[in-house]
Image (cartoon, coloured by chain):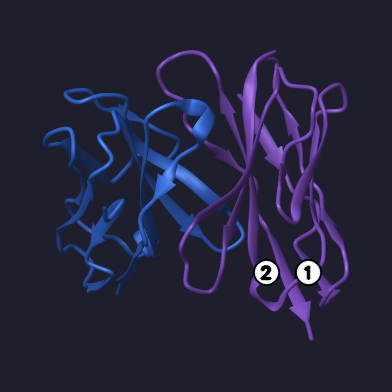
Amino acid sequence: NAGVTQTPKFQVLKTGQSMTLQCAQDMNHNSMYWYRQDPGMGLRLIYYSASEGTTDKGEVPNGYNVSRLNKREFSLRLESAAPSQTSVYFCASRQVPYLGQFFGPGTRLTVL
Amino acid sequence: AQTVTQSQPEMSVQEAETVTLSCTYDTSENNYYLFWYKQPPSRQMILVIRQEAYKQQNATENRFSVNFQKAAKSFSLKISDSQLGDTAMYFCAFSRSGGSNYKLTFGKGTLLTVNP
């Protein structure tokens, strides 16, 4: 039981390049989330998927797209990376709200 | 929209002592959930403790306990018998209990250092 896994753990991009961050969970959770963490800002929600087949914008969706590939997998895509997207990205999943969300180990992304 | 405020950017405590981290929140909801997450240097987000707003009894998990004051919209975390491994960033988080989103709204965090 791996919980929530994310790949890659680290990535360096040049401005304008694209990439996809992968997330998978093996807990049979319905809801999945993408957050970004910046110094002094806490975690901010980028996109979420309340259930398989649905996705919705969070607080800071600009510059990102997501795909809920199946119940297990939820990917985050940067089409044209910008230095402002340098951050640590976390994927999380949840089954019932009172248990909170379970987080992956994070991806540290640097855009030069 | 909900907001979560952690007024202490940094705190320090001596090993074996007790420390309290503050959190206040703003919401018009009556039912909701509150959480404390710990983020050690490894970067992993770890759920420490949770509280359901309709429960008056304060949650406790081993050395961690909360002081939940619903009327004051306050949710502080007390760590007893502090250990070196408690050194981490601590985040307070809020979640609604209704709707389909259940997103977490985080405070900006408190960096806790436990000194030997």
- A45 lies left or right of A21: right
Residue B50 sits in quarter: top right
Residue A75 picture location, percent across and down: 19, 46
In this figure, which residue is indicated by the disc labeled 1? B82
Which residue occupies the foreground of this view, A108 or A69? A69
- Residue drawn 48% across and 27% down? A97
The structure residue drawn at horizontal position 34% and vertical position 30%, both measured from the top left corner, is A57
Q: Chain of mark 2?
A: B
Q: Position of residue A49 (x, y in %)?
A: 29, 30
Q: Residue furthest bottom?
A: B116
Chain with colour purple in the figure: B
Q: Is residue B89 above or below residue B27?
A: below
- Residue at (66, 33) in percent of width and height: B3
Q: Which mark is residue B86?
A: 2
The percent position of residue A16, horizontal first and vertical second, equals 18, 62
Q: Quadrant of residue B69?
A: top right
Asked whether the residues under marks 2 and 1 belong to the same chain, the reply is: yes
Q: Which chain is blue?
A: A
Give the residue type at disc 1: Ser
Q: Is residue B87 above or below residue B100?
A: below
Drawn side of residue B108 relative to residue A22, left or right: right
The residues bearing labels 2 and 1 have C-alpha atoms spaced at a distance of 7 Å
In which quadrant of the rendered image does the C terminus of chain A lie? bottom left
Q: Of helix, strand and loop, which one carries label 1?
A: loop
Q: Give the crowd class for mark 1: few <14, some 14-19, many >=20 residues within 10 Å.
A: many
**Towards the viewer: B77 or B107:** B77
Do labels 2 and 1 touch, CB within 8 Å?
yes
| Residue B60 position in % (x across, y down) | 73, 43
